[in-house]
Amino acid sequence: MPAKVVLKIHQTLDGFVCTTSGDEMWASGHMDESVFTWETEHLWLAGVHIMGRKLYQAMESYWPSSTEAPAAPMNEIPKVVFSKTLKTTAWGPARIVNTDLSAEINRSRQSTDKVILAQGGASFAQSLARLNIIDEYRLLVHPVTLGSGLPCIATPLTLRFVSHYEFPSGVVALTYARTS
């Protein structure tokens, strides 16, 4: 059975991943130990992390020196970075892919029996949703509204509710599956 693609992403109550300028600091006020524990458990389920260049570069500057709980899986699990401009990676194990997104993910589906975890950002998540590649959406919804920004999903979708988990900080993890 091919591996499923899971998108795990933080978003605001009104569905935005970041401000129009790319600021994601709104999420930090609700990141408590229970959120980190949940994220760490879900990160270890991944056989590979897939992400776009922007998110890779942001994570590359943070995770290698982090002592937070998610650092171990973030640093150890192989990463596939989709980019037409990035030539080298300093944070590994990682490889850069500049070919067709769908074809590469289909190859990845055959190469692991674990989850393929898409980490976002907004434009990468939107691309995956538009191509109907995501099998499961794990949305960490924060009790914050921005009023405008970059949405997690910009494509009409019908999803099936799978589960939810409420954190003491007010964050809610909502899991949905693709229906077709």
Image: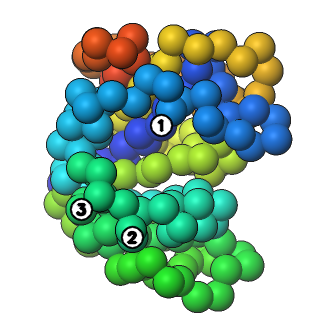
Query: Residue at image x 54%, y 47%?
Result: 120
Name the front one of labels 2 and 1.
Answer: 2
Residue that badge 3 annotates:
72
Q: Residues within 10 Å of mark 1 (few under 14, many from 20)?
A: some
For marks 3 and 2, the one nearer the N-term is: 2
Depicted 34 relative to depicted 22: above or below: above
Q: In the structure shown, which secondary structural element does the residue marked by tag 2 occupy?
A: helix
Q: Is residue 116 above or below residue 34?
A: below
Q: CA distance from mark 1 to mark 3?
A: 18 Å
Q: Please give the count of numbered marks on the rendered protein.
A: 3
Q: Is residue 147 above or below residue 127?
A: above
Residue 53 position, x and y percent, is 63, 66
Can residue 11 be seen at all in this image of the molecule? yes
Looking at the rendered structure, the secondary structure element under dot 1 is strand
Name the quarter where the N terminus is drawn: bottom left
Label 2, residues with CA under 10 Å away: few <14, some 14-19, many ≥20: some
> Which residue is depicted at the point 50% across and 25% down?
29
- Residue 87: x and y, percent? 65, 87
Q: Is residue 46 left or right of residue 106?
A: left
Closer to the N terminus: mark 2 or mark 1? 1
- Name the residue located 61 percent from the left edge and 28 percent from the top edge: 26
Q: Which residue is mark 2?
A: 64
* Amino acid at the residue labelled 3: Ala
